[in-house]
Amino acid sequence: MNNKNNGYTGLKPNRMEALSDGVFAIVMTLLVIELSVPLISKLKAAEELGGMLTEMWPKFLAFAISFLILGIFWFIHHTQFNHIKRSDGMFTWINIFFLMTVALIPFSTALIGEYHIYSKTAVIFWGANGFLCLLMLNIIWWYATKQSLLDKRTEPQIIKLFQIRLIIAIPTFILAIGLSFVNPIIGIVIYVIIALYGITSNIIWGSTKYFEASKKALNQD
């Protein structure tokens, strides 16, 4: 069966999106498990609790960065599937491999929380994990466009703009990973900037007249 027509051998896109949403929900919830409540005597809580919570700041920072980055990845993935209307076996497994990289984020986050942001290995591992997530998002969009899995009403400008937004983020992650070999704090700072930029760009992307016009066109019967 020709993938470029209306046939497919994989999951329907809406089923894939439902699975992806479930994985993201679980993974983002798992992040908070690393933030275990400090175990101290209730008699000493008034004196020691504040200090122990302060000592946990690397874990809170790692949690915040990972949660926000995952939110950005979810937004991108969700926006992609607004335009993807067909699927095939290969596309199904590309999406599953993407979810596998997403599912590893809690472990990467726990490494930073446990060994602090000063650990080169922990920060580099987290960066590599985020890079793989981003790479798989690029592959999802690349494959969907090459195999004509997108809605036929998707304008070429939307396709190109999405490709540019995804590709631009890759060198930034590579830069952060590279600089983490020199100083992991620099890598952390870049990841914070990536998170803030991603949130801002997603808000702008979701509120532009161009994107709204595209959404309106895709929602027409």
Image: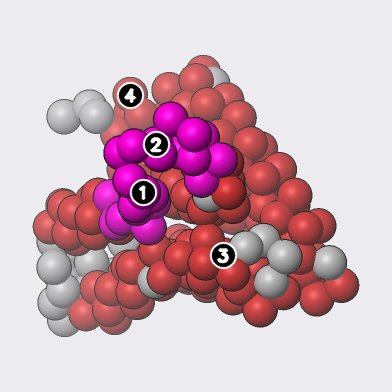
Identified by mark 3, the residue type is Ile
Q: Residue at x 19, y 54 (%)?
A: 22
* Magenta span main SS: helix
Q: Are marks 4 and 1 in contact (CB under 8 Å)?
A: no
Identified by mark 2, the residue type is Ala
Q: Residue at x 34, y 52 (%)?
A: 39
Q: SS of the residue at dot 3?
A: helix
Q: SS of the residue at dot 2?
A: helix
Residue at mark 4 to residue at mark 1: CA–CA distance: 55 Å
* Placement of 173 over or under 100, stated as above or below: above
**Span colored in magenta:** 29-52
Find disc 2 in the rendering and name its residue. 45
> Which is closer to the viewer, label 4 or label 1?
1
User: How far across and down, in percent of the image, does residue 213 sit?
Assistant: 43, 23
Q: Residue at x 28, y 50 (%)?
A: 29
Q: SS of the residue at dot 4?
A: helix
Q: Are marks 1 and 2 in contact (CB under 8 Å)?
A: yes
Q: Callout 1: 10 Å neighbours few (<14), some, many (20+)?
A: few
Q: Is residue 209 left or right of residue 41?
A: right
Residue at mark 1 to residue at mark 2: CA–CA distance: 6 Å
> Which is closer to the viewer, label 4 or label 3?
3
Residue 115 occupies quadrant? bottom right
Q: Callout 2: 10 Å neighbours few (<14), some, many (20+)?
A: some
Q: Quadrant of the C terminus?
A: top left
Identified by mark 4, the residue type is Lys
Find disc 4 in the rendering and name its residue. 216
Residue at mark 2 to residue at mark 3: CA–CA distance: 26 Å
Q: Which mark is residue 112?
A: 3
* Placement of 56 over or under 2, stated as above or below: above
